[in-house]
Amino acid sequence: MSDKPWISVCEFDDLIPDTGVCALVNSKQVAIFRSRRLNEIFAVSNFDPIGEANVLSRGIIGSIGDEVVVASPLYKEHYNLRTGECLEKPEYTVAVYPVRVDDGLVQVQV
Amino acid sequence: MKKRIVVVGNGMVGHKFIDNLVNHADADQYQVITFSEEPRLAYDRVQLSKYFSGSTAEDLALTNADYYNEKNVEFILKDKVVDLDFDNKEVITASGRREGYDKLILATGSFPFVPPIPGNNGEHCLVYRTIEDLEAITHSAAQSKVGVVVGGGLLGLEAAAALKAAGLETHVVEFAPRLMAVQLDEGGGKLLRRKIESIGVKVHTQKATNEIVAGTEARYRMNFADGSHLETDMILFSAGIRPQDELARKCGIQVGERGGIVVDNNCQTNLENVYAIGECALWNNRIYGLVAPGYQMAKVAVSHITGGSDQFMGADMSTKLKLLGVDVASIGDAHGTTPGSLSYTYSNDVDEVYKRMIVSADNKKLLGAVLVGDVEAYGTLQQMCVNGMDLPEDPNCLILPNVDGGGMAIGVDALPEAAMICSCYDVSKGAICCSVQNGARTMGDIKALTKASTGCGGCTALTKQVMDSELKKLGVEVSNHICEHFPHSRQELADIVRIKKIKTFDDLLDGHGHGLGCDICKPAVGSILAAFWNEYVLDKKHIGLQDTNDIFLGNMQKDGTYSIVPRVAGGEITPDKLIVLGQVAKQYKLYTKITGGQRIDLFGAQLHQLPAIWKVLVEAGFETGHAYGKSLRTVKSCVGSTWCRYGVLDSVGMAITLENRYKGVRAPHKIKFGVSGCTRECAEAQSKDFGVIATETGWSLYVCGNGGMRPRHADLFATSLDDATLIKYIDRVMMFYIRTGDRLQRTSVWLENMEGGLDYLKKVVIDDKLSICAELEEQMAYNIGQYQCEWKTTVENEELQKRFKHFINTDAIDSNLAYVVEREQVRPATALERSNTNIQFVELVD
């Protein structure tokens, strides 16, 4: 576990099921997703390294095989939400951040 | 210095020659000049009869002036080449024009043979060969009650169908003892006659016409050699064709005893620099009156001129066609003239089917066949015959009906690689397999890549078999599942949603899928749900399904900002609304461009600006243009009868009606319309999913066209429609597409992949073959009733606007955005510009 502080970014209820939001934390853009079926939240860097724009929070989430993924809204590559790896082009990865819900608040370590 | 190639005649084969040459790798070494005595460039004579069912000359055209101009082909219409000057290597036309040539191609075609019967030159004695002939027939038929076709061959029966369709009492008079004497044997001819008579065409065989004189009850009276007679108002001669060899004959080029320009295997005449191709050419003492051999000759001539080694070695004259609704096919030695040949015959008067096979004396090889009433075996038999394949142990099974699901088809695997599958476009089995290996997966792909089965369509079934077999070999599972989460095609999912009245993605996934879903199935299901129930797409239960563009009701651009496209129905906009667009664009520094769909696109809006911008637009009376949706985009229109000197109907009014009717309707892919106010077609409606063109008798509806990556001319669907019928047909076609289209399948590909094609679609929509039209209309009416402008809903509800922020925890904006000015407007900075510290970026509007 990282010893960085947990930073609250929004209320859990602000997260619409099966969509993402973007939070600005320590001048980093963090994409946060909520999966209703898994009852789980995920946080990765918002920057799409292939499209070179801050857009991943606006992608569609889902599964490919056993992996939970987000599809880039620009060119549709899939990023593993647990590892950050790009499924189509493994040479690209995005940062993954620890995320939790504490007392109704969504918190990340960046 | 380019070599000058003069092509005399711009018919199907002449054009094929030109098309092959200008697309040859060495095309730039040749200058092509073509002459035609007809007033138009090459058109599809094989499909000529379609002219009577509503196709226009443009529909039949095989090329146009733009294409020839682009390929630098010089063309001279309505000027016949009448003489050749071999000394100066020049052609001389009727108007006195001279053009030099290095190589001369005679593609003069043929002319209809009119028997030398006294009285054959009356005003209503016509032939069936060119569009002008058809115009004359239409004109004459309008003043006639009875029509006679002289000649019971293939073209004669086609002409008879035209007269029948024009509502005339129709007779066919044939000199031989049976119909289609060249292609059919006695049994086949007999059944064909029975079938044709049953639909009301009267057939008279073994009749020689002695004279045509004035009639008493009708315009003419035909007196026959046997003493009988027939009265008629018009006469169409279709007694065969004769090679058009007049020019060659006059100039001393060698011609055959019974006509035809003599050519060798290179399609060269007795003069080295002169070639003859198509129906005017006589090869091995034979004229080939079909288009496929003509195309082969065109290919051979191009090959010889460009230094290739192709040779013309004769051609297969097998044919399969539908005449007056009767399926007829003839293969190889249909008459069993090969010495010692044997035959197998299956004849069934109850189902009206006749099949006969001619086999070699040793019962090992198929030599020919005749099929009437059921031509399903054509593909198998024709391939077996042409490729000299061995007959199966029990040849009976090739023609006997399918008793217990058996039925015999040669596996396409047995065909050699070189087997010609599509003779119209010269596509071999190998070429189809190769395109599958290169990624083709559907019939649409195969058609686009090889052109196979886009000519007469006779090889469609066989082409599909070859494709499926090759796919199987490659281990490609021919699966239509939308993705790994649902074992169903889009159409099946649409049926499930509709029949089980499923309203959410989760319910569908719970009952019929697994996993979490993905970016393939979620938007597809979102579209299906919207198509049937049309709820607000950003409702919480649907929002996670929407593609990026739908989710923020704008089109995401490369830097993550959005474009804004308000609806401008029919392209009609007031000055006041234009001013509002200008003011908004100026205030937010949006790059502004006119779109191809007659509206205005504003680029570079940040997420948080969208609701504010749309608030202004909605207040000014704008609605969302759904530029982001798989839904109706625009209805492009010309200005129509309200202003245009030529306009026949109010195209702008109709365009606005259609655009407002179908706006917001979700479909498998985007849908575009065009409405033209007259046949000049300024709105380019024939390149749209739905094209509407005004004529003197009402609207013509075209369907399933496309521009873009793979252009496709729309097909004429119905003519002379009033407003209500037009809308009814569009409702039905569109809802049928929504129900049965595949994910991201445009209407063009949808139609191409539809079994039965356009005819089937007409049966479903016009004849209500599936008895679903009422349901389709109801579904559309419900959908239209549910329409809401998503942006209006959004700007009226603050809760819904919360999502339109780049960050959930601050009002800051994306620091990655950078713009520079070009041609007085903003554009995203390039990577190079970003790294240049000297560049001044545009200050962003908050």
Image (cartoon, coloured by chain):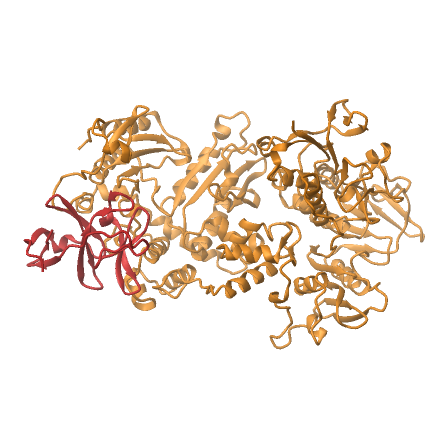
Chain colours: A red, B orange
For the question of whether residue B267 can be seen, the reply is yes
Relative placement, left or right, of B245 versus B554 is: right
Q: Which residue is drawn at 51% across and 65% down?
A: B472
In this view of the protein, which residue sits in the foreground, B232 or B226?
A: B226
Asked if A51 appears above or below B500 in the picture, the reply is above
Relative placement, left or right, of B825 versus B721 is: left
In this view of the protein, which residue sits in the foreground, B358 or B25?
A: B25
Asked if B711 appears above or below B409 in the picture, the reply is above
Where is residue B489, by image quadrant? Answer: bottom left
Where is residue B742, by image quadrant? Answer: bottom left
Please identify the quadrant where the C terminus of chain B is shown. Answer: top left
Q: Which residue is drawn at 66% across and 50% down?
A: B424
Relative placement, left or right, of B789 versus B127 is: left
Residue B262: x %, y % from top left: 83, 43
In this view of the protein, which residue sits in the foreground, A41 or B266?
A: B266
| Residue at the extreme top of the image, as rendered | B96
